[in-house]
Image: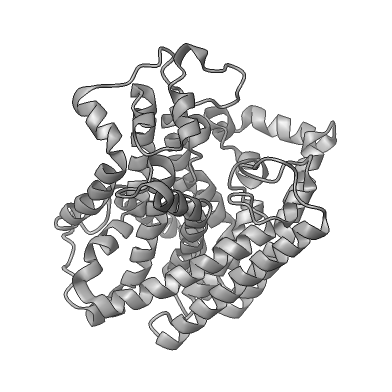
Amino acid sequence: MTAVAPALSSPRTERTRRLVGIDIARFFAVFGMFCIHFGVPFAHGDVEVWIAQFSSGRSTALFTLLAGVSLAMMTGRGEPPIGEALRQARIKIAVRAALLLVVGIALAKATAATGFLLTVIIPFYGLYFLLAVPFIRLRARGLLIAAVVAAAVGPQLSFVLRTWIAGDTPMRAIVDAVNLVDPGHLIADAGAFNLLLLGFYPAASYLPLVLAGMAVGRLDLQSTKVRCWLAATGLAVTTVGYQVSNWLVETVGGLPQGQIEGTVPIEHPEWLVAAAAHSGTTFELLDSGGIALVFVAVCLELADRTGRALKPLAAAGSMALTLYAIHALVLAWQIVVGGWPLSGVPDTLAQLASMGPALPTDVPNMPAFPRDGHHPDGVVAFVNTYMPEVFLIFSIVFPLIWRRFFRRGPLEAVVSESVRRITDHLFRRH
């Protein structure tokens, strides 16, 4: 964390060192999450609603796809490692995965006050990285095949396994026994089975996006032709996924009343043919994943064509992990002080947050809204009221200042330096 970041001197120089477009795409991924949790900055009415609805699920898909791109870039880009280099790459990724699990579980515990309003994705990221280790040696074609197979099988297999776990079965007994000793589950409901099957972003459903991202990262992303193919493929995938999903929904006679949040409920398997946000179905992966491919292609091209103009967004995207963690902590603070409903949040949730003593006690995972229904005043009220705008400005200004003195963001530097120290020690022992 002591090295001074080099200036972004020119697009050509930057392209050979770091793909700035990927950092810009990371910024848009976390920006979508900011819009969901804080409200949409500088927008009101139908525009605000549209941006929030578009971001729901799709920002998570973009964030997850970019995790795969990062894995490919850390492991040789277009040339996967072999021999001793492959062994060392696997160890480094496994160590990084373990550290992300630790950081994610700690963040989930620290932000427990957010309740059902936020599921910290970082521990899920850790498991995604760990499950991706066997695929590091594959080239783009092999990774693409693996992603297609995982997208076709994973969500359905996840549904079947969850139905077994829900019943009085040996599978349920195994899960209960593991949860009794699993520190992640005991600390923050982020144990092995939570992350693999039962949580909001289960690896069994979302790993295909990571594999697809790895396939993208193995391509020559400096090629305009490749970017055009990515954008065209993304548009085709999202269109086909959406249209086929609509046809299947009509075929099964429609969906049950109400919306679902998270994985498909085992009581309603018909939701498996829908493309609902955060459901982790095959069709949601196609819809959101296709749009993510378009975003990646567009951001890569914009980075080359705009030069330094998008430097602030690139700087913010290079610190996506740090900004994500800060936004989670800020959201928890907003809820505890009673200021969250003052910003641009949905009316129904704002009303719930303001109920005070009338807050229902039987709703699972209820956020820690003040039981006396109070709201802050003065400067705290102002900050909470304009939190969408305040946090957007912070997420651009803070990285620009930080990058003048340090090469990596705070959390990125901690993880990377820890990986380096741990793996150097392990490699010396062998």
Position of residue 150 measured from the top left corner of the image (x, y, whole percent): 68, 63
Looking at the image, which is closer to me, 198 or 95? 198
Asked whether the viewer can see residue 189, the reply is yes
Q: 215 or 268, which is in the foreground?
A: 268
Residue located 61% across and 33% down the image: 182
250 w.r.t. 291: above or below: above
Taking the image as shown, residue 16 lies to the left or right of residue 28, namely left
Farthest right residue? Answer: 169
Which residue is outermost to the bottom?
225
* Residue 29: quadrant of the picture: bottom left
- At a point 56% along the width and 78% down the height, the residue shown is 233
Please state the horizontal and vertical placement of residue 411, each as a whole percent of the image. Answer: 32, 47
**Total labels drawn:** 0
Can see residue 84? Answer: no
Judge from the rendering whether residue 31 lies leftward or rightward of residue 122; answer left or right.
left
Residue 345: horizontal and vertical position, in percent?
41, 37
In the rendered image, the vertical position of residue 278 relative to residue 108, given as above or below: below
Residue 337 occupies quadrant: top left
Image: 118 above or below 211: above
- Left-right relation of 379 to 122: left
On screen, residue 153 versus residue 314, left or right, reads right
Check the image and tell me how it is coloured.
one colour
- Tell me residue 231's x, y (percent): 49, 77
Q: Which residue is drawn at 24% across and 54% down?
A: 396
Q: Which of 402 and 369 is in front in this view?
A: 369
